[in-house]
Amino acid sequence: MRVSPSKVSTRLIIGLALLASIPWLSAQEVERGEVSLRGATSPAEASELSARPSAKNGLVQPPSRPLEAILANGRYNWSAAYQIQSMVYYLSITGEEKWARLIVDFADRLLEGRDALSPVDGRPYAWLDRSENLTAPYVWAGYTGHSFAPLMEFARYVLAHSEIGRSIYKERTFRDHALGYLREFNRALAVHYGELRNDGAYNYFFFSGPVPARSRRLEGLILPVNMNAALFLAILHAAKAEQTLGDGRAAVKKEQVERFFDYLNERVLERRVCLQGKSCLVWDYSSYTKRVEDVGHANLVAKLLLDGYVDGYGVRKADVVALANTVDGLLNPDGSLVGNLLDGATIKGTSPALYYLVFLADYSQSVRSKVGCVVGNSTNFAYSGPWRKIGGGEVVNSCVY
């Protein structure tokens, strides 16, 4: 959504550009991330802000300070939300208040970076991409969803756990913080709902107006699958949070998510035979870019599928297992990638990450072994939370070369 920039200047971020800092513009411009590379250091690992090694358990600690939403070059900082999501997993695993405090610190900094003014109330509601790939600042709905999704999952957890909810931090209870994040997401949705299409059978977001992209005309086209998945993921968790509150908006959101899953199942996801006769799951990057999804963006779709499966939406276990088979075929025994697309092919301009694909280790012992190698060699805290969430522990010298 194209909006006018606010007078708030973009803050400079300290240090190196983090991984996953792309503007989701075209099929070629995909997420920067981290892959297991023998004898090499990824851009994320080279950055002090990405994570700090832990001598205690072989894993890593969160970044030493909150991350900015926008990088110095005007691009989105995708890493920020991945780091917060990892903290949310640690909170759900341990129930320790220290994680809630960290989440609030990082979430507040993230929201402070909003510089797109809402046409509804005139206040900041989202983040403007000012990268070189655009002719004017622009709000990508996918980044709104990606940034709010871990905050909505945090709100869902806090509202369901009163012992955390009633604790006080920064002169407010965590319940109040959670309600504030939920309120801010609904403000953002009030704008993005102008991009929601209901064609009678399905719900999905599309480019409702002109997009100042240099690459191609996007107006009227359906958002890429990963962008839709990111926003619907935030809606899914917001619905659960509102359900706990007895808020009537939860039912509306739930139906919207259900109709998007119908769209995925019937129009997007493709089941293929692969890996010695096993079933694999793939999909195209978008309806207008006919090539298979890249590994980096696949994380967002995978998380929606996995969370939807757990929450009882229309996701079949067979499809989750098929996606695990896809990831298994993409990883060498040492965790390095065969290719950067889901079908094993390689194209230029992608730097894939595994983030939420780590969860597929729960559905394949082979994937668990390979992912364990990646996590064991990584200094990215964003990998640590998902690995711990599936019961992974210390992984040292577990790689097969």
Image (cartoon, grey):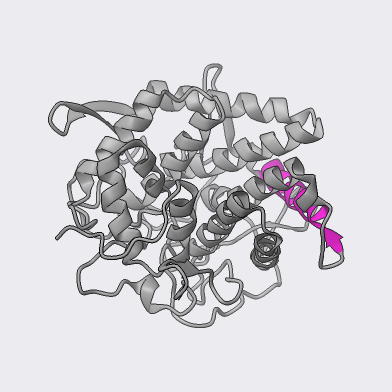
Q: Foreground residue, 274 or 283? A: 274
For the C terminus, give its image quadrant: bottom left
**245 sits left or right of 89 in the view:** right
Q: Foreground residue, 131 or 322? A: 322
Residue 312 coordinates in the image, percent (x, y): 55, 25
Q: Foreground residue, 381 or 274? A: 381
Q: How many marks?
A: 0
* Residue furthest right in the image: 171
Rendering quarter of residue 115: bottom right
**Residue plotted at (82% across, 57% down):** 167
Residue 276 seen anywhere in this rendered image of the structure: yes
Magenta residues, as a range?
172-191
Residue 230 coordinates in the image, percent (x, y): 51, 44
Magenta span: predominant SS is: helix
**372 sits left or right of 387 in the view:** left
The stretch drawn in magenta includes residue 229 = no
**Is 191 placed above or below 351 here?**
above
**Is 256 placed above or below 110 here?**
above
The stretch drawn in magenta includes residue 184 = yes
**243 sits left or right of 134 in the view:** right
**Is 161 placed above or below 384 here?**
above
Residue 220 seen anywhere in this rendered image of the structure: no
Residue 53 coordinates in the image, percent (x, y): 44, 74
Residue 148 coordinates in the image, percent (x, y): 62, 51
* Residue furthest top in the image: 200
Q: Foreground residue, 366 or 311? A: 366
**Residue plotted at (72% across, 30% down):** 250
**Residue plotted at (46% across, 36% down):** 306
**Residue plotted at (52% across, 36% down):** 307
